[in-house]
Image: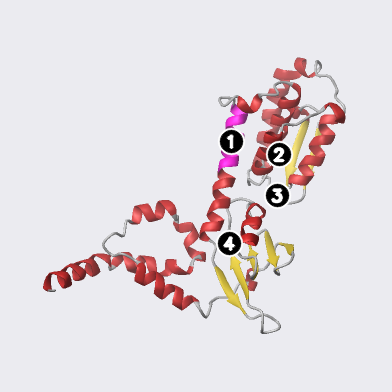
């Protein structure tokens, strides 16, 4: 069995390179053990037991596969796009899953992605959906704070965000377009992106200390948020559904939510009384 270890995060480029070599050498998915930095020992043993079982079931089929050259391997663009997205998931089994799907597309069923009831496709689709959802939430819940720049002339903004998966890179084009004329940095536990209005620089494992504890204009934003809150329609369940509490710690306006909800009923009653007296 060949062991392949992925060192980078999310590891997409490494996986592509190793998967291409493995296909060229006709390595069956059951003959490869993919290891990643975030793998646990239980994951390893689970993988070994699954691979052993599948290998015994498919051993006779492996010998019938014909070795293919680089020139004869054509991967559908739709498959590549799904792999790129799924490999941003934190599931340590993502590399073995993507290679297994890739192998099956190349050697067994070119239209595998259309088999919506296939177990591998179901799992792959679930990973992709989770990553897409995580990337969307970054654009919705990320908040910048202003910091002093070295030249004291150019404004710079920093945000700290904790994605569930490795989705930072997926949203960089969005932030570059939306905040093109602003210098900013987005910090996450695994990587940071720094934009100076002309180029992007990535930094691994940044320190959260770069994120300021407060912002001089934040109090105005909080005042605005408190004033647009409608006490007659708090709808806490709907709020938690669209904005789960785990994101609150990095969103300045959320410090007001509990108090606004707690006092909503009394404020609503006061509005009604004032309207009646008028």
Instruction: Identify the residue position indicated by label 1 in the image.
Output: 125
Quarter of the image where one finds residue 74:
top right
* Label 4 Cα neighbours within 10 Å, binned few <14 / some 14-19 / many ≥20: many
In three-dimensional space, the C-alpha distance between marks 2 and 1, rounded to whole angstroms, equals 14 Å
Q: Quadrant of the N terminus?
A: top right
Of badges 2 and 4, the one in the foreground is 4
Q: Is residue 263 left or right of residue 28?
A: left
Q: Quadrant of the C terminus?
A: bottom left
Q: Residue furthest bottom?
A: 152
* Label 3 Cα neighbours within 10 Å, binned few <14 / some 14-19 / many ≥20: many
* Label 1 Cα neighbours within 10 Å, binned few <14 / some 14-19 / many ≥20: some
Give whichever of discs 2 and 3 has the lower sequence position: 3
Give whichever of discs 3 and 1 has the lower sequence position: 3
Residue lying at 70% horizontally and 28% vertically, measured from the top left: 51
Q: Nearer the viewer, residue 138 or 277?
A: 277
Would you say the magenta stretch is mainly helix, strand or loop? helix
Where are the magenta residues, as a range? 119-129
Give x and y (percent) for residue 178: 60, 62
The verdict on residue 125 being magenta is yes
Residue lying at 55% horizontally and 75% vertically, measured from the top left: 213
Q: Nearer the viewer, residue 79 or 48?
A: 79
Instruction: Identify the residue position indicated by label 2 in the image.
Output: 95
Give x and y (percent) for residue 13: 77, 46
Give x and y (percent) for residue 234: 31, 60
> Do we see residue 25 in this rendering?
no
Label at residue 10 = 3
Instruction: Identify the residue position indicated by label 4 in the image.
Output: 161
């Amino acid at each position: 069995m060949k062991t392949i270890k992925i060192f980078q995060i999310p590891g997409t480029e490494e996986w592509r390179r190793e998967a291409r070599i493995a296909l060229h050498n006709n390595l069956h998915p059951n003959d490869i053990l993919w290891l990643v930095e975030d793998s646990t020992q239980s994951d390893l043993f689970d993988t070994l037991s699954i691979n052993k079982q599948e290998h015994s079931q498919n051993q006779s089929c492996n010998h019938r596969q014909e070795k293919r050259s680089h020139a004869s391997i054509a991967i559908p663009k739709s498959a590549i796009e799904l792999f790129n997205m799924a490999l941003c998931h934190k599931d340590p089994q993502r590399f073995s899953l993507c290679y297994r799907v890739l192998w099956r597309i190349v050697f067994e069923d070119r239209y595998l992605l259309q088999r919506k009831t296939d177990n591998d496709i179901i799992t792959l689709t679930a990973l992709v959906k989770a990553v897409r959802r995580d990337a969307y939430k970054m654009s919705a819940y990320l908040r910048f704070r202003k910091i002093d720049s070295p030249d004291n002339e150019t404004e710079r903004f920093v945000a700290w965000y904790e994605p569930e998966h490795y989705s930072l890179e997926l949203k960089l084009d969005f932030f570059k377009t939306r905040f093109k004329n602003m210098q900013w940095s987005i910090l996450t536990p695994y990587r940071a992106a720094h934009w100076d209005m002309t180029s992007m620089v990535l930094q691994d494992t940044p320190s959260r200390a770069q994120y300021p504890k407060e912002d001089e204009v934040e109090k105005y934003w909080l005042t605005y948020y408190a004033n647009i809150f409608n006490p007659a329609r708090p709808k806490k369940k709907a709020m938690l559904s669209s904005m789960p509490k785990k994101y609150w710690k990095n969103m300045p306006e959320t410090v007001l939510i509990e108090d606004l909800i707690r006092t909503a009923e009394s404020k609503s009653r006061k509005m009604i009384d004032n309207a009646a007296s008028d």
